[in-house]
Structures are given as C-alpha cells and as structure tokens.
Image (tube, coloured by chain):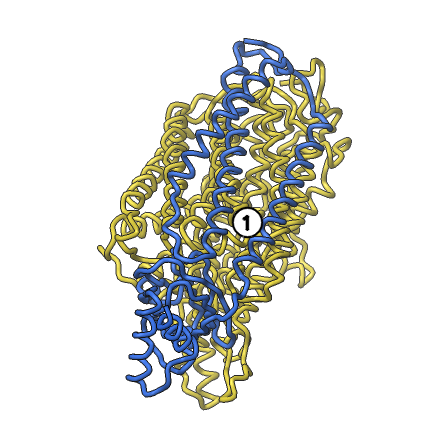
Amino acid sequence: MSVPLTSLALVRGLIGYIVGFAVGMAIVLLGRLVLGVEPWFPEAVYVGGIICAMIAFLLSSGVMSDWLKWTRGVDTPMPHGSPAGRPAWARYFGIDYNHKVIGIQYGVTGLLLLIVGGTFALIFRTELAEPGMQFLTLQTYNEIFSLHGWVALASILLGIGGLANYLVPLMIGAEDMAFPRLNAFGYWITVPGIVTLLASLLVGGWDSGWTAYPPLSLRGAVGYQFMFWGVFAIGLSSILGSLNLIATILMMRPKGMSLFRMPIFCWAVLATSMIQLTATQFIGVDFLLLSFERSLGMPFFNPIMTAEGVNIGGQPILHQHLFWFYSHPAVYVFVLPGLGIISELLPVFSRKPLFGYRWVALSSLAIALVGFLVWGHHMFTSGYQPYLRVAFMISTLLVAVPTGVKFFSWLGTMWGGRLTFPTPMLFTLGAISVFLIGGLSGPVLATVTTDLYLHDTYFVVGHFHATIFGGFVFPFFAAIYYWYPKITGRMYNETLGKLHFWIMTPAFWVMSIGQMSVGVLGMRRQIADYDPALGITGGQIAITFAGFAIAFSILLFIYNIFTSAEVGVLAGANPWRSRSPEWQIPSPVPEHSFASPISVVGEPYDYGLAGSKYVAMAGAGDD
Amino acid sequence: MPSSASNKRHFVIVGVLVVVMTIVLGWILNSVLPLPEAGVAQAATVDALFRVHMWLIAFLFALVCVFMVYSFVVFRRAKREDEGDHFEGNTTLEVLWTAIPLVLVVVFSFIGVRTLADITAARPDELQIQVTGQQWSWMFAYPNGTTNAELVVPVGQPLMLEMTSKDVLHAFWVKEWRMKQDLVPGMTTHIHYTPTATGEFTLACNQVCGLSHTNMYAKVRVVTKEEYTAWANEQALAQGVQPHEQAIKLDLQTASN
C-alpha cells in the first residue's frame, strides 16, 4: 500500500511550520516597516517566525481539527484503529487518539532525541579526551554542550511521556486516557518544539549551557530565542500531559482498585505529574521573560547601574530562582517514573511482594513534595542571602530520607525471593547500582561547606548523570525490554540484550566515577579545554572510551528491537508471569485493550501467596 | 547455606561483609579522590568534612550493595515454578530506616551549619581586595587604589575579597583555596580566605561566561610578608599612590623581627 507523503500529519505539519515561519517573519518585518523602525531586527523577526511556525504546525497537522469542528458545532466521532486502506506504520506518523499509539510516538521520539543528545556528547567528549583544542572551536564546543543539555532533557520528558501514556491506562484497565484529543495534542506540540530547539544551530546556537543564566543569555546569537520557545512548547506538553495522567489515574480506575491497590508505577506517575503540572509554568514564564528582554528590551534580569552605583535595571539572580524552581523538581520528574519501574519489576523477577508497598508509594509523594523546597541548593555560590544557604542545605539533605526508604524497600523485596536475571531484571539492578552512585554523591553537594568546593565541577556532572541514568535511562531500557513482548507480541533477543547490559553498565560506572574524580582534582564543568597540569588526562581518556562503549551498546539495542519485531519468538500473553492487568490480555494489545471491564479483587504484588488473585477479567478465563 | 530468609546466619554474614567493604571502600575513596594541596586555613574544615562524607558514602554503598549481591547469590531461583517467601513488609523496619536517616540528616545539618559558619567568618585585620571580572579577564584593586592583573597576597594575612562583574556572571575559584563565589553584575559578593601556603596558583572562572570562559584564568601568587611589602611598595610607587595600611603594618612587623 502506498501512502502519499502529504497525507502524513508529520509531513503536513512540517510544511506548515516552514510556511508559518516565513509568514511570521514577514508580519514582523512589515509591522516594523510600517512603524518606521529598522525592519531587520533578528530578535523580533525570528520570534515572530517561531510563534507563527508553531501555530501553523499544529493547524496543518490536523491535531486541532476536532476542536475546531466543535467550535462550529460539528460532531466528531472517536476513530478507532488504522484508517482503512492505509498500512499500519502510517498510523504512527499521523494524528491518532489511541494512547498506545501516542505512547509509542512519545517513546520513539524520546529515543531518537536520546541518540541525538548522546551524539552531541560524543562529539565534545572526543574533544575533551586530550588537553588542547583538537577539532572544535570554542564557539562550536559551547553550542554543542549547551544543546546536548536541552536535547537530552527533552528526550527524557518524551521518554517518560511514552512510558506513562502506554502503561497507565493498561495498568488500571482503562479504555484510554481521560482526554484522548488533549493527549494527541500534548505529543504533537513537542514536535515543533524539538524542531525549533534543534534549528537554533542554524542561526548561531547559544552558549550558556541549558541553565541560560543572564546576563550571558541576554547577549549572543539569536539561537537563544529558538531555545526559549522550543523549551516553552515542550513544557506546555508536560503540563497538558500531566493533567491528563492525573485525571486518568484518579478517575478511571476499575472497581476495587483503591489508590493503594494500583500498580506502583501509577503512584510514581501520579507524583511526577503533580510536579509537572505545578512547576513547569515557572520555567515557561522565565524563558518568556528572557525572550521579551532580548526582543522588547524589558529589563527583568540585566542590571543597569546609574553613575551613583544604584541598580535601576533587573536582577540576574531572579532568573536562577525561577529556573531552579522548575528545574530542580524536574529532576524528580525525570527519576520518579524510573524508580517506579524498578519497584514494578523487582517483585516480578523476585517472585515476592513489593516490600512495604504503602511506604514506597508515599515516598514518591514525599520526594515530590520535598523536591519543591530545595531549589536554592543550585545557588549556594550565587551570592543570595547567606541564611538561605542553611535552609536549602537542610531541606536538600531531607530528600535522602524518602529516597532511602525506596532503596531499603527494594532490598527487602529481593531478600528471600527467588531471583532470575533476564535482561529487564539486569537493567533494573543496573539502575539501582547507578542510582546509588548518583544518590550517594548527593549529600556532599547538599552540604554547603563541601559544595563550595565541588560546585560546578565535574563532580556535579558525574553526580547528575548517574542520577539521571540510574533514575531514567537504565529503567527506561528495563521497561522497553520488559514490555517489548506486550507491545510487539514477540520476544527480543536475550543474548543481545544481555550484551547491551554488560557493556553499558560497567562503562557507565567508569564514566561516572571518572567524572567525579576529575572533578575533585579540579576539572570545571562546561569548559572546552583543560590545564594538563591538573593531571586528569588519563581520566578524561577513560571517560571518553566509556562514552563510546555506551553508544555502541545502544546501537546493539536498536538493532535488537528492530530485528526482533520480525524474527523474535512469539511471546504469548504473559511471559513474565506478572499479576498486572496489562499481562492478562493478549500480546500485542488489541485496539480495544480490554474486551470487558476488569475488577480488582486482591493485592497487586501477592507473589508466592497461593490462590491469591489481583484482577478478575469478566467472562475471560485465566491465562 | 541457610534457606529461610529470616535465618540469623544471613544477617551475620551480611553484617561482616558490610563492615569489610566499608573499610576497603572508604580507603579506596580517600585515595582515588585525592583533594589538591590545601592553600588556605579554611581548607582544613572543608577537607575534613569531605573525608567524613566519603566514609558515609562508603558505608551506605556497602550496605546496599552487599545486601543486593548477597540476594543474587543466595536467593537465586532454582526451579521455574518457585515463588518467593511471602512477606509484604515490616512496619518496624520501615520506621527504623526512616528514623535513622532522619537522625543522620539532623547530625549532618548541624555539622554543615557549624563548618559553614567557620569558613565564612570574617577574621580580624583583613586585607580587602576588590575583584572585578569581565569577559574574559580579572582585575584586582588594593585599598590604596593600585590595580593589577595578578592577585598577589601575603601568606598568613586574612583576606576579604569583594567581588563584582562588569558584564555577565563569573565565579572565583582557586582550587587550592577550595571555596568559590560568583561575581554578579549589579551587586557585590564577598569571600574570606587566609592563605597558608606560598606559591603560584591558578584562578579559573567557574561560571560559564561565553566564548573564552575556558581560558579565563589569572595568576595568584602567595608570597612571604617581606616579598609582599616590597611588591606593594613598588606597585604604589609605580602607580603614584601611598602604600596601603596593611602593607605598612606588615612592613613594620617584618622590620621589627
């Protein structure tokens, strides 16, 4: 079956984006001409282009068509399944309201961005292997490490969107998400966001790192505007997606599934969504203010000193508060779903109940809550009021308590179990080991006295990469291997999966510990070159090699998931003998996931309790 | 091997392994992560706390890893249909592993506050130097108005650096001096040091500040009091001002010795 390219929402959207960009630029140019000011002011012209391009993308892709019809009073049916006469793959490039399709769209886009972000890292990692500048200029180095940050974070946000959208409705036995059209919109708005973010490279990039601290971010190339607006769009997706997930989890659970009888991953998504719904606005506002200051000259952040030394302008530190009020809680957005995956998989592969279910569930909420009170620990050297350092040190150390509960509960889950080690379990355990490295390197940074030394060194780089790999990337791989048979109906290749694990995990340990040690020896973060006198060249080479090993293992993973979809052995409905609702239905999951409503009649993780049941499928027999 | 998960022998073995691994790991951490030579009095406090943290990391890492790896070995599944021991949790344990970390948090907060007060305290008779950062250079101004691109200070003399920036954020960091501080345009920030080691050190900007951030270095020379007064007098003479108060005091001290 052939499909005309222009019938794909993605293609139509991108064409709309380009046309919209040109129209937006023309409007601003004309407006400025009419007003009699110099027409070519890139800061304003490009912003006009970006805004129109994004709106044009959404309109031309068709993701808003149903809503627009509603404004005219036209009724729209909810479509189900692939449109007639079109191949199945085309669905994934089009507007689809099925949460399983949207979940895959999110997940695959997230993986693609992970590869793009990782490639940026390999480029500057190679440059850093030896002292001296080898093949990058200072300018390109700064642009690439900056872009690495936001591309990687976008990939995580989309990866989480993928996990949550695909799994939550299946885990609670729901037909779909609460608001399917909003769900599609939430995914599709990230696409122009990502395009805008990446397009920054074409107009000179930006060079401040992902934190965009002013006044630096108020100077430099117009690439900053592309970053601000790209992030804004992705942030809007976070807000809408989390709203949808909260509504779904709270309102669409089946009979008998009280909150404390949900699969534990749903608790993690609930906690994460509460953060996303309430914190994302701060970075949105912050980046808009930066954009306005650049294009309209409004003085929010840049100080303007009078001759008497009085500041009549803005305050650079204000940005740091606004930025970290989102960006610290965002770290918990990134890791809570992954920690939920760990808690979800350990009981299955230990054949034992999750130790202290309620404590694990509530620890996610506790982390989310405390996570709102700690943003100032990123600002210990910023020059804000000294007493704030003490308050933020104490609140930050407190995060260790609920995080500890999770670790100890995992140990309790494995203790006395009957453990097996297929690839998903290996990645779960790898995640625990890596997250442990990330977590344990936290308190020394939370304590102001020692942070004043380690702040903005490679120790911090090692710390947060371990946190995010342990809290997101490793669990993400665990999840993909684990639910792969549910998604495709076939098993992945176990040998390749194990090879992926056994290359990636030791390499990551080398990378993390290497980064932390060069940091302690004096390697600053975000620099293109370093002083050979620091004696860290050996460490830098090791980190670079480890980085390439990780990249190679991820190529194996990609090969595995692509080939196994064709040649993998048929998996059956429940290859892991899980009790969770999504494993009680056929693999791959049919268009209407549950043939009839399910009800919950027991505890979710009663492995090893004879005769216990979690879900009852009306009418259907046991697997 | 004991079979039941609550058999005491498991816990004895794990306990011994945790102690051994803590000691080995603590030793490794404190040798793999050697801090650079210390150059100021305040560094002793920072370094001591860093070492305490390394031991805490060693202990917690050992605790989690030993339990985990022990489970891999002892609680490996033998037959496909095997199921684990059925226990859903233990409230006493949960309370314990919430309360003990909470106590640790309080202890570390207390230590954190005390050490912070120590390293940020002003010392009597400080030499005040104005530090100005701009893309991508440093400037140091002494109390008598002399300015210099190198920071030259006498050993043993308490310093207060008053810092600001002419353009974007920068950060002052000499790794041998441990603590760092941002330079913010539109406001003044402070930091206190008492240099204890003579020699040449490198000041590196530690807040990303644009194109040449990587290379935004300045030389820091810590010299003896005699060398310092000679240098300060020479600078004053060259820039046509009087030597500053501390330089005169140091001159008198060294003359009377």
**Eyeballing the image, is A509 above or below A212?**
above
Q: Residue at x 59, y 33 (%)?
A: A407
Q: Is residue A169 left or right of residue B246?
A: right
> How many tags in the picture?
1
Q: Is residue B33 left or right of residue A411?
A: left
Of residues A335 and A222, the one nearer the viewer is A335
**Eyeballing the image, is A118 above or below B119?**
above
Of residues A385 and A92, the one nearer the viewer is A385
| Quarter of the image that includes the C terminus of chain A | top right
**Eyeballing the image, is B128 above or below A38?**
above
Shown in yellow, the chain is A
Helix, strand or loop for disc 1: helix
Displayed quadrant of residue B101: top right
The subunit carrying tag 1 is A
Displayed quadrant of residue A282: bottom right
Percent x, y of residue A437: 48, 38
**Eyeballing the image, is B195 above or below A112?**
below
Q: Residue at x 43, y 70 (%)?
A: A216
Percent x, y of residue A425: 50, 26
Percent x, y of residue A340: 59, 36
Q: Residue at x 56, y 33 (%)?
A: A342
Residue furthest out toward the bottom: A36
The reply to whether residue A11 is in sight is no
Callout 1 environment at 10 Å: few (<14), some (14 to 19), or many (20+)? some
State the residue position of label 1: A331
Q: Amino acid at mark 1?
A: Val
Of residues A609 and B249, the one nearer the viewer is B249
- In the rendering, what colour is chain B? blue
Q: Is residue A377 left or right of residue B93?
A: left
| Quarter of the image that includes the N terminus of chain A | top left
The reply to whether residue B177 is in sight is yes
Of residues A107 and A310, the one nearer the viewer is A310
